[in-house]
Every structure is written in structure tokens, then in C-alpha cells.
Image (tube, rainbow, N blue to C red):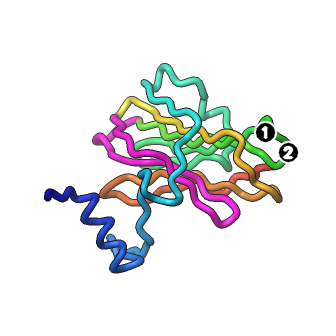
Amino acid sequence: MTFDSRSMLKGAMCIASAVTLAGLSAPLAYADNDDPQFQAPSTSETGTISSRSIDIQALPSDRCTALSNGDLCVIIVQGSSGSSYKNIRVGYTKYSGSQIHAYQGYSANGAEVTGPYFYLSAGSYRTDTWNNRYLPGCPGIVGFLYADGQGRFQTPAAPSC
């Protein structure tokens, strides 16, 4: 039987609910089909910066976070199933730096949803969109990116109404 580092980390999660990494305590999160918070995005898109369909400079400033090698944004659009349903898009544009192995997700109303792992190189972007998510009460929605070896980065809480 062989073990990869991700399997070993998942086993460690059963023993301890949190780890200290780089001086910060944070619960472990995983973006795979075995994780109850994993919900595959309705759509995902990866491409070069010049081909992206969203101009992040046109977004309200409360929806993006400038990171050292790129920009992380969350976009909320009215869903098609009623006022409590939202389409949530989380996107990271990587301008520089080394390739990352990461996943994106969002949190709202105390719940967290993660998408699948992906690799992203400088000069590229990745967006994950979850359509028609039921979010009653106009919660603030936080988009996040978890990059292996670097940790979690997130946007400010964006209003959903």
C-alpha cells in the first residue's frame, strides 16, 4: 500500500482537529470528493490573463484582495431560482511568482464550500462558479483561495443583497 502526502495529512486530521502552521492555528480543509464541504462548482474556467472575461479593476473594491502575486475576488450575482438564490464566482488572477497547487471556495452563513484542486502559473487565472446556491438573509460572502504551502487567503465579506 502506498500513501501520498495528502492521504497522510487527511489521516492526521482525524487525530488532531487543528495544526499550527507558520505560527498560525487553522483547521485543516480539503477539497476533494471525500470531504463533506466539497461541492463541485457548476463551472470552472482557467486561462491566460489576456483572455479572461472579467475585468477585476471594474469590480467594487470590497470584493477583491490584492495579494503579493495576484488578485483574489468574489462576485455575487442573482440566481435564477428566486431572491434567496445566488450565483457565486471566486476567481484568482496570478500575475507573478511560482506555480501554485490550490483550491478555491466561499463561506456564507457559517458554512464553507470548497472546489477541486488545480495548478496555476503566472500569467493565468482561475474562476470557479457555484450557481443557484440557497443563501437566505443576505449574508456576507467571503471568497477564499487555499494554496498548498502558503495557507489561506480571503476576500472581504461581500454583501449578497
Q: What residue is rendered at 40% in x and 74% in y?
A: 24
**Amino acid, disc 1:** Gln
Crowding near pointer 2: few (<14 within 10 Å), some, many (20+)? some
Horizontal and vertical percent position of residue 66: 52, 47
Image spot of residue 109 (x, y percent): 70, 63
Can you say which quadrant of the picture contains the N terminus?
bottom left
Sequence-wise, the earlier of marks 2 and 1 is 1
Taking the spot 58% from the left edge, 60% from the top edge, the residue there is 112
Where is mark 1, residue-wise? 78
Q: Where is residue 28 in the image (x, y as percent from the top left)?
A: 41, 67
User: Which residue is located at x 24 percent, y 65 percent?
Assistant: 8
Extreme residue in the top direction: 51
Is residue 105 one of those drawn in magenta?
yes
Secondary structure category for the residue under label 2: loop
Mark 1: which secondary structure?
Answer: strand
- Count the numbered circles shown: 2
Q: Identify which residue is drawn at 38% across, 52% down.
A: 147
Q: Distance between the residues labelled 2 and 1?
A: 7 Å
Q: In this view, does 125 lie above or below 104?
A: above
In the rendered view, tell whether residue 28 sits above or below residue 95: below
Front position in the image: 54 or 41: 41
The dot on residue 102 is: none
Q: Nearer the viewer, residue 74 or 58?
A: 74
* 48 drawn magenta: no
**What residue range appears in magenta?**
95-121
Residue named by callout 2 = 83
- Give, as a three-letter code, the residue at label 2: Ser
Do labels 2 and 1 touch, CB within 8 Å? yes
Give the residue at the far bottom of this rendering.
Answer: 16
